[in-house]
Amino acid sequence: MEEKSSLICDACQARLEEAQVQFRYLGKSFRYKAPRCPVCGQVYLSAELVTGRMADVERQLEDK
Ligand SMILES: [Zn+2]
């Protein structure tokens, strides 16, 4: 059975670890969990996560 979080870094062949990463959009920054390579530090962003976060930020800005 395959673990859903067992992503492997293409460059390092290392198992990605879930880490708190900082994400910036429209001058705002916030943290969320994403899989990250412990060797090269590459973060793997899912399009769904990024799109959802961007929508949240845009909604907050519109509320002002
Ligand atoms: Zn890597």
Image (cartoon, helix red, strand yellow):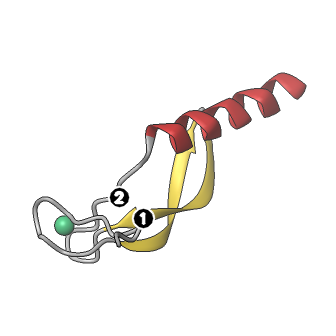
Determine if the C-beta at disc 1 is less than 8 A from ligand 1.
no
Q: Can you give x and y, in whole percent of width and height, for residue 34 in the image?
A: 47, 61
What's the residue at 67%, 30% (across, down)?
Answer: 55
Residue farthest along the right direction in this orientation: 64
In which quadrant is the N terminus drawn?
Answer: bottom left
Q: Are marks 1 and 2 in contact (CB under 8 Å)?
A: no
Q: Nearer the viewer, residue 62 or 36?
A: 36
Quadrant in which ligand 1 is drawn: bottom left
Is residue 64 rendered to the left or right of residue 4?
right
Q: Can you give x and y, in whole percent of width and height, for residue 46 in the image?
A: 44, 45
Residue 39 visible in image: yes
The local secondary structure at tag 2 comes to loop
Is residue 25 rendered to the left or right of residue 61?
left
Residue 27 visible in image: no
Q: Is residue 35 above or below residue 62?
A: below
Q: Quadrant of residue 54?
A: top right
Q: Nearer the viewer, residue 22 or 56?
A: 56
User: Does label 1 or label 2 sit earlier along the sequence?
Assistant: 1
- The residue under label 1 is which amino acid type? Lys
- The residue under label 2 is which amino acid type? Val
Q: In this view, does 64 lie above or below 29?
A: above
Q: In which quarter of the image is residue 27?
A: top right
What's the residue at 41%, 49% (across, down)?
Answer: 45
What residue would you read off at disc 2?
43
Q: Can you give x and y, in whole percent of width and height, for residue 22 in the image?
A: 52, 58
In which quadrant is the C terminus drawn?
Answer: top right
The local secondary structure at tag 1 comes to loop
Using the numbered discs, state the Cα–Cα distance from disc 1 to disc 2 in whole angstroms. Answer: 16 Å
Q: Can you give x and y, in whole percent of width and height, for residue 62 in the image?
A: 82, 22
Is residue 5 rendered to the left or right of residue 37?
right
Q: In which quarter of the image is residue 2?
A: bottom left
Instruction: In the rendered structure, find residue 4 and report the number of the disc placed on it.
Output: 1
